């Protein structure tokens, strides 16, 4: 990338609505798509776009995330490239990050050391492909102080996001974070223009506004609640239309795909988007790969072919190290070292690492965290009233089993 741009990835979110998946790990460290973590998608977009200096600001339950970053995201130091995690350093006093804006304020030393002209502030927990260089180019050409990536979403979903009102030139006229009554887009009463939580700033302006925000006792110290509305009021904010982003190898089905996975139901739906014959999000795009580190597991193995005892997987993603031993898997994602034993049936589910599904068990519409043994003939996802007595069940009836939980 020819511009002097620093990437900042905000990875300190608690992810409370994803519990129990975030009981022992930060939200950006939640596994997704077999052997990826949520943070791999945002980082891949930055690295593929040419950003090679990236800091990841962490906070809650960061050990799993830190370990993944150390194992995975090593760029060439010979070229001055890096992806590095930065925990709350408490440079401004003995306190954690009070919000996303405060996280940047507490780490202004990084901007002082790196001296970028522009800063790309991206989230760590969305599923999408985006060439960030195109957004940076628009930002520079427009002369805006901040550019906010925007995407149309159904009006009923817009309450979860910052909502943008922009004029025909792209200048943002109003910005409201998580409004109870989102304003629809002009000419489109069923959709609102939502912020993706991705921003590009002029570096000097970013430094100025987070310092100003830190001195405001009434502020929540949040990018969406405070910083962006401030710059909108000053006439310095523009929107970038994510729908116009061009990514190599991307087909029309995937164009404009972006999923926030802030709830268990959103996580399950985004996972199911991966497994169809023509997936809404295609992991097999080699022109814009999603990067991660993979342990050298042996290939997946499908065994037994005798009557109904057949190891099969249909419309599913099956990771290395998986053994389907006479069981049946449909429309599911199996992470490394999963075992599905004879006569077991797994449907519309996501199984994390080292899950063992016992002989004759039935699992439907479930997310099972790592190191869980499903006993023989156990039934999950077929009787939700019974499941609610033992597990977490989402609003839409997805059964979620915590990491290492012992099933009696």
Image (cartoon, rainbow, N blue to C red):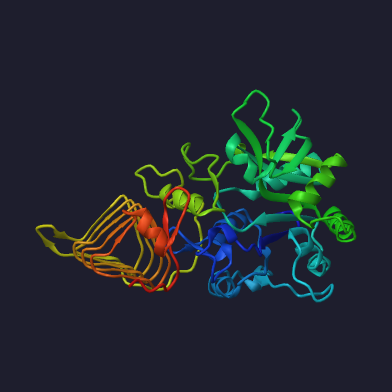
Quadrant in the picture for residue 400: bottom left
Q: Is residue 189 left or right of residue 377?
A: right
Q: Residue at x 79, y 60 (%)?
A: 116
33 or 142, which is in the foreground? Answer: 33
Q: Position of residue 111 (x, y in %)?
A: 80, 64
Q: How many marks?
A: 0
Q: Is residue 47 above or below residue 96?
A: above
Q: Is residue 188 left or right of residue 386?
A: right
Q: Residue at x 55, y 69 (%)?
A: 25
Do we see residue 154 in this rendering? no
Quadrant in the picture for residue 354: bottom left
131 or 223, which is in the foreground? Answer: 223
Q: Is residue 389 left or right of residue 125?
A: left
Q: Is residue 152 above or below residue 267?
A: above
Q: Is residue 394 above or below residue 407?
A: above
Q: Residue at x 71, y 55 (%)?
A: 121
Quadrant in the picture for residue 98: bottom right
Q: Position of residue 297 (x, y in %)?
A: 36, 72
Q: Is residue 98 above or below residue 197?
A: below
Quadrant in the picture for the N terminus: bottom right
333 or 387, which is in the foreground? Answer: 387
Q: Is residue 258 left or right of residue 182?
A: left
Quadrant in the picture for the C terminus: bottom left
Do we see residue 146 in this rendering? yes
Task: List the single residue furthest toward the top.
Answer: 187
Q: Position of residue 43 (x, y in %)?
A: 59, 59
Q: Position of residue 87 (x, y in %)?
A: 70, 73
């Amino acid at each position: 990338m020819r511009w002097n741009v620093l990437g900042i990835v905000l990875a300190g979110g608690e992810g409370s609505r994803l519990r129990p998946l975030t009981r022992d790990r930060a939200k950006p460290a939640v596994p997704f798509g077999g052997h990826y973590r949520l943070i791999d998608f945002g980082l891949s977009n930055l690295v593929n776009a040419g950003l090679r200096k990236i800091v990841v600001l962490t906070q809650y339950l960061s050990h799993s995330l830190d370990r993944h970053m150390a194992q995975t995201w090593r760029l060439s130091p010979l070229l001055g490239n890096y992806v590095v995690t930065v925990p709350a350093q408490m440079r401004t006093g003995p306190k954690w990050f009070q919000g996303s804006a405060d996280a940047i304020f507490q780490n202004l030393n990084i901007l002082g050391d790196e001296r970028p002209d522009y800063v790309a502030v991206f989230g760590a927990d969305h599923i999408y492909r985006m060439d960030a260089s195109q957004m940076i180019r628009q930002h520079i050409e427009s002369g805006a102080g901040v550019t906010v990536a925007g995407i149309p979403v159904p009006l009923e979903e817009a309450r979860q996001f910052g909502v943008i009102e922009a004029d025909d030139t792209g200048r943002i006229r109003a910005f409201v974070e998580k409004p109870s009554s989102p304003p629809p887009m002009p000419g489109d009463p069923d959709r609102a223009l939502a912020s993706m939580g991705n921003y590009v700033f002029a570096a000097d302006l970013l430094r100025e506004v987070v310092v100003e925000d830190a001195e405001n006792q009434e502020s929540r110290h949040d990018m969406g609640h405070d910083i962006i509305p401030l710059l909108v009021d000053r006439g310095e904010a523009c929107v970038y239309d994510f729908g116009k982003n061009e990514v190599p190898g991307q087909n029309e089905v995937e164009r404009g795909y972006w999923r926030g996975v802030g709830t268990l139901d959103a996580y399950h739906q985004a996972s199911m988007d991966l497994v169809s014959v023509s997936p809404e999000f295609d992991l097999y795009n080699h022109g814009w790969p999603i990067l991660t580190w993979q342990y050298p597991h042996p290939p997946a193995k499908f065994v037994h072919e005798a009557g109904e005892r057949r190891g099969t997987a249909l419309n599913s993603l099956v990771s290395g190290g998986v053994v389907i031993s006479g069981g049946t898997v449909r429309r599911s994602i199996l992470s490394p070292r999963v075992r599905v034993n004879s006569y077991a049936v797994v449907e519309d589910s996501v199984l994390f690492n080292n899950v063992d599904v016992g002989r004759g068990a039935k699992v439907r519409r479930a997310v099972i965290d790592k190191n869980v043994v499903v006993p023989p003939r156990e039934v999950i996802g077929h009787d939700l009233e019974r499941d609610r007595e033992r597990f977490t069940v989402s609003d839409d009836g997805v059964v979620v089993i915590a990491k290492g939980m012992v099933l009696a």
